[in-house]
Image (tube, helix red, strand yellow):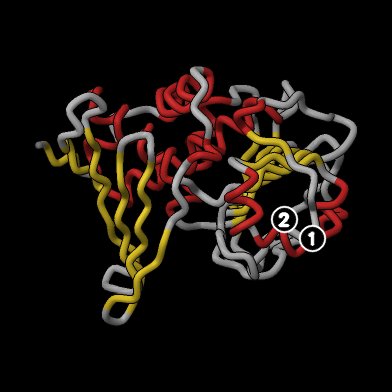
Amino acid sequence: MRFLDAEAVAQLSYTKAVEALEDVLRRGFDPEADVPRSSVPVGGGELLVMPSVAGAVKLVTVGGDPRIQGVCVVFDPDTLAPVAVVDGIALTNLRTAAVSALAARRLAVPDARRLVVYGRGPQGTAHVAALREVLPSLEQVDVVGRAGAPSLEDADVIVCATTARSPVFDGARVSDRAVVIAIGSHEPDAAELDAGLMRRAQVVVESRASAFREAGDVLLAGVTEVSTLAEDAAPDYTRPRVFKSTGMAWEDAVVASAVAQAR
């Protein structure tokens, strides 16, 4: 059994990770069938357990030093033997940005030129790199903290990758041309996007079960009509498109397996 560290994870391009995710959905994998994450109190923090029917389990601790740590164990689909242990934080950064890139490639206007990213942490950095790979028409990228106030009216892609528990901008400033990607929270009482934006947007999620269980952006706005990545709904360019991600174990499993196979 191999240990694949952050350097090994970084060898897989975002484009390859997107292709792996798209391929498993195209072959009929149903995210609705995946197992919900669970949380176990440990010491001064918590252990998140994320098993997937796609053949992996990710274990992440929150509250330690550093604050977030973890690994993902990948299993052989035929023998069920563990074949690799993958650095969990590097994997999370890669797969989260790759899932967002998959959504952006499907939902952004074809000539998207301006990207605004809320969040200066690792996820913000990963999203800039991933979106540059899949949206070659991008010309301008603005990365801001929560206190930042960039113009949004001409933004084609907006990413929220923050720890905020309340909306980070006024959704009325978002044009119908834009796609908004929110990945910062997976709790039912936290939302990076306001209700006004959510209610006027075409909302796409990873799975309905996950969204209606964990996505505060969806739940607090009272949104009931959503489509999923697996359905690959046609983008409605007459209104904003919102992709709300909670992060799911099947994504970790697919990308971790792609990392292992590439080594």
Q: Sort mark 2 into few (<14), some (14-19) or many (20+) by Cα contacts within 10 Å.
A: many
Where is residue 145, by image quadrant?
bottom right
Image coordinates for residue 105, horizontal then vertical, percent:
62, 26
For image coordinates 65% across by 45% down, the residue present is 208
Residue located at (66% from left, 27% from top):
231
- Mark 1 in CB contact with mark 2 (< 8 angstroms): yes
Q: Quadrant of residue 196?
A: bottom right
- The image position of residue 186, as x and y in percent, is 55, 59
Residue situated in front as seen by the camera: 175 or 79: 79
* Image spot of residue 194 (x, y percent): 78, 61
Point 82% across, 48% down: residue: 174
Q: Horizontal placement of 259 versus 190: left or right?
A: left
Q: Quadrant of the C terminus?
A: top left
Task: Residue 243: give x, y in percent of width and height.
Answer: 67, 42
In the image, is residue 208 above or below residue 119? Answer: above
Numbered badge on residue 218: 2
Label 2: element kind: helix
Quick one: 149 or 8, which is closer to the camera? 8
Q: Which residue is mark 1?
A: 221
Count neighbours of disc 1 (C-alpha within 10 A) and say few if under 14, some if 14 to 19, many if 20 or more. Answer: some
Specify the amino acid type for callout 2.
Answer: Val
